Image (cartoon, grey):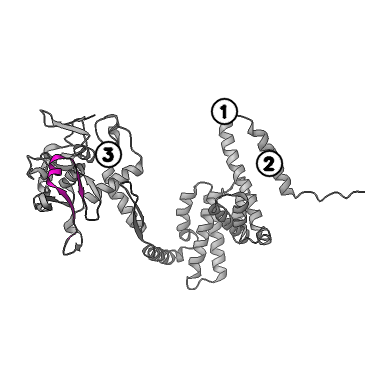
Amino acid sequence: MAHDPTPPHPLLVCADAIEAALKEAAGVDPIFMTLADKRVGLVRFAHLVNLVEAVRMRMIAAAEDVAAAEGHRDVASWLTHRTRADQRSDRRAQHLAVELDTRWHHLAAAVQDPGEGWVNLDQAHVIARALGDVSRALAEEPGVDADLTADILAKAEVHLIEQAADYGPKELAKLGARILDVVAPEYADQVDQRSLEAQEAHARRHTTLTTTPLGDGTTLIKARVPDPVATRLVTHLEAFTNPRRAHLAEDADCGAAGFGADGEKLPYPMRLGYAFCSLLETLDPKRLPLHGGDATRIVVTIPVDQLQSGVGAGTLPDGTRMSVGEVRRLACTAGIIPAVLGTGSHVLDLGRTVRLHNGPQRTAMRIRDKHCRAEGCRIPATWCEAHHWKAWSAGGATDLDNGGMLCSFHHHLIHDPRYHHTITPDGYVRFTSRT
């Protein structure tokens, strides 16, 4: 009589049942579900995804022999090879799987239980990371032995699992960073101080900035800086993005920061990019370190005939070229000195000390103009830049009569050769496209 083959493992039976059910559901269009059913279904399937992933991680924790049998470094690399998934995701899952299997058993139970107290995988990653940080911190704390560490960690694990009922991963990460305040307040301050000092030292070691010209007129800037520096930078940039005036979007010609020439709202990263450019243009060279015996300045070289005609290009010291319109605009506000060349490349003018409007002049212009002088624009003057009506590069004086306030958008526009501008009888600037 033939011997029955070994029955499949219950987990594989479960996988077959799930696959069959999902194949059957694949042909059902959810568009016809009622609103109530959609609400239930979205949450139920989110739970199911996490339950399936929890079972998969239990298998990952028990599958080292699979990787060893085929010469792979670990289960994550074996999975990536077989499933063509992202190795970072597989490695992250493997790390949590091992942590749940070997250390955080209460958390493992909460991940696998869809009932009350259930923890989803995003929360589990955050909780496991927080517990690991506490474990490493306590290992360096004098007078904390293994038994006390285990007791503190057990309390921390239970508390964070309880908080997962009310908080998402981002909030749990903040709670986890200060969990000792709750479960072991007598050690919280010392551990927190050491942790912050270690983070600051780590940030200093890994602070970098690189620039990569892309050959299309742009340069890729990549920076890794300490968190406080990033916060300070974003704070400065958001001042330039002028979020308080976002409600002016309905005014197509208002030029509110964050809106393009056609009135379309610009993506936030693009707005920050423009703000970064504006920030660099408003830096005071006198407050920068000396460079070559002088305050840091940039010289742009341009022939006088090109500056006057508006056709040509200026050149920066590193060979970067810019349009005449951009040279004229920068001459209004930026720490850039135009070196105007005559015939034979002789320097005719290397800047003038009164090229930029000074503080009292800008203050007087803000009081006088109150807002951007572009017709229809109501950006407050405090957000605007001083502009020479008759270009300084063309001999215009740096005084109140030859100056007015323009927002960043219109200050760029007035130097854009694609637009013609005129002064209206009531003193505002009116723009018209040349095309």
Q: Is residue 321 above or below residue 26?
A: below
C-alpha span from label 1 to label 3: 40 Å
Residue 190 rendering spot, x and y as whole percentages: 42, 67
C-alpha span from label 2 to label 3: 52 Å
Residue 376 sits in quarter = top left
User: Which residues make up the magenta segment?
Assistant: 295-316
Q: Residue farthest to the front?
A: 344
C-alpha span from label 2 to label 1: 22 Å
Observer-nearest of 235 and 376:
376
Q: Tell me: 231 left or right of 317.
A: right
- Mark positioned earlier in the residue sequence (2 or 1): 2
Observer-nearest of 99 and 137:
99
Residue depicted at 88% across the width and 50% down the height: 3
Dot 3 corresponds to which residue?
Answer: 257
Dot 2 corresponds to which residue?
Answer: 18
Q: Amino acid at mark 2?
A: Ile
Q: Is residue 125 above or below residue 205?
A: above
Q: Amino acid at mark 3?
A: Ala
Residue 158 sits in quarter = bottom right
Q: Residue farthest to the right?
A: 1
Per the image, label 2 sits on a secondary structure element best described as helix
Q: Tell me: 95 left or right of 313.
A: right
Checking the image for residue 31, the label placed there is 1
Q: Amino acid at mark 1?
A: Ile
Answer few, some or many: residues within 10 Å of disc 2's Cα (few below 14, many 20 plus, some between 14 and 19): few
Observer-nearest of 319 and 246:
319
